Image (cartoon, rainbow, N blue to C red):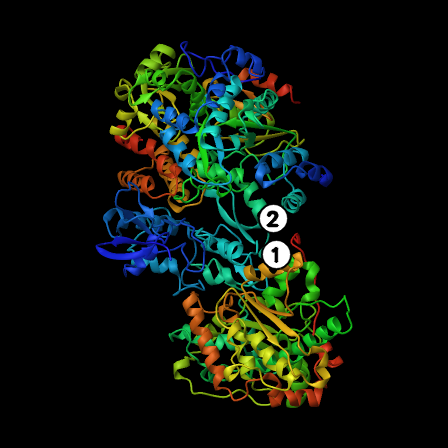
């Protein structure tokens, strides 16, 4: 069976072709305006492309929200005999299916974005790192790469521009941590996917020690549209501080699970009600946004429009954009235990606070699940989480305690009553 | 020189080179930051997260050992955030660290325990592991592992892979299941381990140790039927004082002689004597090889010749360059030569049945344990050497017997085979074997002493990774006419990573030397895997100084001038390279290969 | 089973670190060896990739999709993460354990199926989800389980 998430929104940019064209036929992509942006891009000054992306205000869609144009500029400015572009398709955050849908539904949109980005930063080699479990994505991307090569959109002298770009699929092997960009890079190099110490950062020293840009699938899918329609158009979508559309995935206790593309100008509650037809099985108790390491949002918080600016102000993130709804029959402790077990297994195990911390977090939550947790256990848990937030090597260790800290804040009574 | 950058550490301003770590800036400022995974000999890991500091302008704490200074920084090392994070990370490590401190070989010298003490860890915050989870790996003759004490600092991995270019350890699994394992989760005895023990020297806890044979030695000492003979190598003598509170580089040879006699050893001999014997044999072998290559054009004879005193190095080449074993000198190491001579010539001299003799070697080395157990090491009909003791084991034995070096008188070695020359002494430092060999070979060939002030061949001394020198042989004696005008090219490498550089050149056919000394350990034997812990570049330098000082004070400084050696050849062996020498003092090697994995 | 070293050499004839294809090739080797990586296979990979055995082992043990223990002909992976957990993946796992008479991580006596837990397989809008070999199954209802398994028997 091929998995297709239901597309719930209608006025789509990135999802426009998904389900409407045959992903394995490049001509259908081209007939729908595909590769026009690339044709335009190869006539443009490389710096002008980066400026255009910077002006658009596009931020990374993998969860970290780093301005894409600014990232590109680091590698553009670096001098090296070889630069790389890597697309991160190691989509591992539970609740997140967007990269899969984009790859399996419209692979050429990603390839087009990659070639434009590679041209802009001067990378002649690129990888799309797809998680090993995504067999259909791997097949589709491989087929699409072959077609693009045949059409002259990839390979030597692309569209007569003199620019060469070679692109391959790299595979994951079942490790969530490889979504972290330096772990991903090590994984491509044939190593254990353990995050590197930073600095140096990949745009300066990445794959095989060369300047490397790592972008998320959704991020790169935006690029052809920005080049084709201009940064002004992109800025006209959504809030001024977080322009463009964002893909959100509705899952859990929801009437209509599926994927939604929308500018960030409506609240999560609206997304849930308008597209997902509301929660099922009861009232919403909470939603975890952005995967296992995402923040827990109370119904109150879901009512707000979470622009990038507001997220910064409240120190939360919508991460990958998954919206995992839990109704009021769900136990917060059970949910935390699932999350904690996930991280105990998915920590790479390199640094102390994450390797041991995730284990101890799980242990304490387990105590609460068995009704054996105490007030002082909760205090230790909180202290541990706060330290895990600021002392591990990478973002996994820092972010994996978000739901626990949020739960302690919003559901302390329930946890202690367990 | 790169740009200097200002760093403010707790209000103290220092300047460091761009790219230096925050930790090094802290050291410069005299601010102590606790470290666990950091080691001065190793690459940065940044994994234990104990050396956390606050850097102004950064939200998260940073590991000072890993953070490079590339712009002016303001660093705080004592804030509450820092203290709490350090303590928490220690708590987390401690909770997973199983083992009774009392029964641990590192009791009293454990970095983890010291940190727990200094950082006020006063209770187990988390349920403490209370029973062993792993079987100890005690199969190897040299290295034993107790994974229950492992704290995942990865020092052993970095030592093995990066520093020594041996590939025994690696991190296995993921998440909380992470373990430091040897390939395929085998015993360390069954993989490509060269037994150098450098991992033991750098382990912060008791997770790695050497196979302890001191109990068997005690048994034999007490057995009235057995005659137990000790031989001591130069390096332990330059280091064992550290175990008794002396500063590194304190020479305690003569006090140690007294202590060992009191411990019950029947004779105490000097391995330097056997080092002189090695020089005679190896020097002769070198000249024979050169003759075959230069005069007879014999393609089957291999040049450069590599020294074979270091059992770690020997096993390294057996595993990693099995097709090049012909380059190794066939000479046994001094330890093994001595054993063979003791159980033949010396046994006869002192009138004791060799079957009643037990030879014990005090060595700086963990690989010597493996070496003395090699099946081929029994030319006399008996094991050449029965036990290899490390410096650490010897110190423990003496402490157990209440023998403290400070209280000991000074005593000489036993006569007959007692003493070695200064040339034998410097075997303990990198370049020493080469220097000793050249002192003899040059004089043998030219009839004149080596043209260096006070015989000190300084180009091969010091801690440089690979040292090279060349020596023109001129006005040679008539029997060495074929060497007239030859520029003798020599090289010295210490640490197997440096040896690997030379070996790779050998494989490529670009290695242009006649004679190469390799020691498996950094600094040579004085940095061996059986030496007192800790080890640092400074400590190794101090030990080297002690060794070179002792050389200068010994009257006889050339192996061939040692009268005891001359006597041994006259009375027993004939001449260097004789049939008897070959039988007793030379050996052969085994092609092991990298994919040698035993079930 | 004996390892087909010739096949591994064939697979690795395309290996180059530059191509970043170590993982891809290792997946192929695992398939060629019957869903797991025996010692002889790892040793051959180590030789061909000129990568020391300890590193090959460290690599393989890191990634959940590889196994150094024998596994069955078909691998069933049940997602255990949040969105699937609330939609009954635990019950699904229980049913599978009962049906196949194995625990999680075990292989059936006839070496036909290995049952494993997996991290999210990106099928979260169709929870509960599982994979059998390369196929994804979403919205798996308890009553449909037998007909799905039948395809693989």
Residue B592 appears in which quarter of the rendering? bottom right
**Which residue matches tag 1?**
B192
Q: Locate residue B400 relative to residue C142 in the image: left or right.
A: left
Q: Position of residue C123 (x, y in %)?
A: 49, 21
Secondary structure of the residue carrying numbered label 2: helix
Residue C16 vs residue B9: left or right? right
Mark 2 highlights which residue?
A: C53
Task: Give how far across and how far down residue A282 sits, in percent.
Answer: 34, 15
Residue A315: tell me if it is visible: yes
Residues at marks 2 and 1 touching, judged by CB atoms closer than 8 Å:
yes
Q: Is residue A72 above or below residue B255?
A: above
User: Which x, y percent locates residue C83?
Assistant: 43, 23
Q: Residue at x 38, y 12 (%)?
A: A276
User: Residue at the location (57% across, 16% down)?
Assistant: A26
Find residue B341 and report its image quarter. Answer: bottom right
Which residue is located at x 68 percent, y 88 percent?
Answer: B348
């Amino acid at each position: 069976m091929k998995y297709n998430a239901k597309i719930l929104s209608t006025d789509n940019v990135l999802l426009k072709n998904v389900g409407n064209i045959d992903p394995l036929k490049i001509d259908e992509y081209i007939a729908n305006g595909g590769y026009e942006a690339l044709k335009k891009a190869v006539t443009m000054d490389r710096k002008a492309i980066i400026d255009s992306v910077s002006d658009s205000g596009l931020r990374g869609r993998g969860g970290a929200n780093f301005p894409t144009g600014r990232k590109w500029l680091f590698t553009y400015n670096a001098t090296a005999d070889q630069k790389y572009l890597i697309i991160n398709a190691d989509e591992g955050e539970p609740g997140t299916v967007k990269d899969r849908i984009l790859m399996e539904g419209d692979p050429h949109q990603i390839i087009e974005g990659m070639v434009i980005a590679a041209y802009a930063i001067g990378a002649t080699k690129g990888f799309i790192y797809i998680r090993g479990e995504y067999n259909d994505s791997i097949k589709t991307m491989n087929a699409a790469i072959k077609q693009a090569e045949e059409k002259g959109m990839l390979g030597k002298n692309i569209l007569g521009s003199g620019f060469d770009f070679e692109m391959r699929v790299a595979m994951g092997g079942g490790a969530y941590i490889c979504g972290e960009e330096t772990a991903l890079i090590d994984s491509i190099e044939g190593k254990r996917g353990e995050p590197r110490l930073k600095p140096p950062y990949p745009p300066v020293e990445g794959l095989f020690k060369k300047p490397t840009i790592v972008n998320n699938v959704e991020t790169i899918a935006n690029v052809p549209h920005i080049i084709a329609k201009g940064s002004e158009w992109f800025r006209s979508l959504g809030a001024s501080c977080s322009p463009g559309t964002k893909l959100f995935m509705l899952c859990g206790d929801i009437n209509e699970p599926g994927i939604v593309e929308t500018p960030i100008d409506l609240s999560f509650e609206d997304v849930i009600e308008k597209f997902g037809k509301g929660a099922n099985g009861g009232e919403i108790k909470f939603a975890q946004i952005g995967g296992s390491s995402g923040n827990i949002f109370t119904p109150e918080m879901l009512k707000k429009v979470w622009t990038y600016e507001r997220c910064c102000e409240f120190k939360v993130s919508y991460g990958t954009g998954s919206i995992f709804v839990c109704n009021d029959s769900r136990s917060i402790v059970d949910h935390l235990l699932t999350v904690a077990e996930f991280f105990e297994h998915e920590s790479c195990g390199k640094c102390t606070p994450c390797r041991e911390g995730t284990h101890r977090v799980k242990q304490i939550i387990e105590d609460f699940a068995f009704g054996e947790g105490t007030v002082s256990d909760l205090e230790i848990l909180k202290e541990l989480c706060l330290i895990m937030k600021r002392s591990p090597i990478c973002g996994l260790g820092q972010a994996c305690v978000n739901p626990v800290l949020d739960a302690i804040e919003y559901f302390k009574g329930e946890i202690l009553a367990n | 020189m790169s740009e200097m950058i200002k760093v403010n550490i707790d209000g103290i301003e220092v300047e460091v080179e761009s790219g230096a770590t925050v930790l090094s800036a802290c050291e410069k400022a005299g601010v102590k930051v606790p470290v666990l995974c950091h080691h001065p000999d190793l690459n940065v890991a940044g994994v234990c997260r104990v050396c956390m500091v606050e850097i102004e302008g950064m939200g998260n704490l940073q590991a000072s050992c890993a953070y490079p200074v590339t712009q002016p920084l303001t660093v705080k090392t004592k804030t509450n955030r820092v203290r709490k994070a350090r303590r928490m990370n220690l708590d987390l490590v401690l909770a997973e660290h199983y083992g009774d401190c009392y029964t641990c070989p590192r009791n009293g010298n454990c970095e983890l325990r010291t940190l727990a003490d200094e950082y006020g860890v006063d209770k187990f915050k988390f349920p403490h592991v209370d029973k062993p989870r792993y079987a100890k790996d005690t199969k190897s003759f040299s290295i034993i592992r107790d994974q229950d004490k492992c704290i995942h600092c990865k020092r052993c991995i970095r030592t093995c892979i990066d520093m020594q270019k041996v590939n025994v350890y690696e991190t296995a699994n993921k998440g909380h299941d992470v373990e430091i394992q040897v390939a395929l989760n085998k015993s360390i005895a069954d993989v490509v381990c060269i037994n150098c023990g450098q991992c033991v020297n750098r382990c912060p806890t008791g997770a790695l140790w050497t196979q302890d044979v001191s109990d068997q030695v005690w048994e034999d000492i007490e057995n009235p039927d057995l005659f137990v003979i000790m031989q001591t190598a130069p390096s332990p003598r330059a280091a064992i004082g550290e175990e008794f509170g002396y500063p590194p580089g304190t020479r305690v040879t003569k006090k140690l002689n007294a202590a060992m006699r009191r411990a019950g050893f029947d004779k105490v001999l000097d391995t330097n004597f056997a080092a002189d014997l090695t020089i005679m044999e190896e020097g002769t072998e070198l000249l024979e090889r050169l003759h075959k290559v230069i005069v007879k054009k014999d393609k089957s004879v291999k040049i450069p010749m590599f020294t074979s005193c270091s059992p770690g190095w020997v096993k390294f080449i057996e595993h990693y360059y099995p097709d090049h074993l012909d380059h190794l000198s066939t000479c046994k190491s001094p330890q093994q030569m001595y054993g063979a001579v003791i159980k033949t010539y010396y046994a006869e001299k002192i009138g004791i049945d060799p079957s009643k003799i037990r030879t014990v070697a005090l060595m700086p080395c963990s690989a010597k344990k493996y070496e003395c157990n090699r099946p081929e090491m029994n030319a006399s009909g008996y094991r050449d050497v029965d036990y290899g003791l490390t410096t650490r084991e010897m110190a423990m034995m003496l402490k157990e017997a209440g023998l403290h070096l400070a209280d000991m008188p000074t005593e000489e070695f036993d006569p007959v085979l007692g003493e070695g020359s200064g040339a034998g002494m410097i075997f303990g430092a990198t370049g020493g074997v080469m220097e000793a060999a050249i002192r003899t070979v040059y004089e043998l060939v030219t009839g004149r002493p080596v043209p260096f002030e006070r015989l000190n061949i300084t180009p091969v001394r010091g801690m440089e990774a690979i040292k090279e020198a060349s020596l023109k042989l001129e006005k040679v004696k008539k029997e060495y006419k074929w060497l007239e005008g030859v520029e003798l090219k020599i090289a010295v490498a210490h640490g197997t990573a440096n040896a690997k550089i030379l070996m790779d050149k050998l494989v490529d056919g670009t290695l242009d030397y006649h004679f190469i000394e390799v020691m498996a350990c950094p600094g040579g034997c004085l940095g061996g895997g059986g030496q007192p812990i800790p080890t640092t570049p400074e400590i190794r330098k101090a030990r080297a100084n002690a060794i070179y000082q002792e050389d200068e004070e010994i009257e006889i400084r050339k192996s061939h001038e040692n009268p005891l050696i001359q006597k041994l050849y006259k009375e027993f062996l004939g001449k260097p390279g004789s049939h008897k020498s070959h039988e007793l003092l030379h050996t052969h090697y085994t092609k092991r290969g990298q994919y040698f994995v035993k079930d | 089973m004996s390892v087909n070293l010739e096949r591994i050499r064939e697979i690795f004839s395309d290996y180059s670190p530059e191509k970043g294809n170590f993982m891809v090739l290792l997946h192929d080797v695992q398939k060629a060896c019957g869903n797991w990586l025996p010692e002889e296979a790892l040793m051959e990979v180590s030789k061909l990739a000129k990568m020391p055995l300890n590193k090959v082992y460290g690599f393989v043990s890191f990634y959940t999709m590889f196994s150094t223990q024998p596994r069955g002909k078909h691998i069933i992976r049940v997602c255990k993460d949040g969105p699937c957990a609330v939609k009954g993946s635990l019950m699904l796992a229980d049913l599978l354990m009962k049906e196949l008479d194995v625990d999680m991580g075990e292989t059936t006596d006839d070496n036909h199926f290995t049952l494993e837990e997996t991290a999210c397989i990106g099928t979260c809008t169709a929870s509960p989800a599982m994979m059998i070999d390369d196929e994804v199954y979403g919205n798996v209802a308890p009553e449909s389980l037998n007909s799905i398994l039948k395809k693989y028997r």
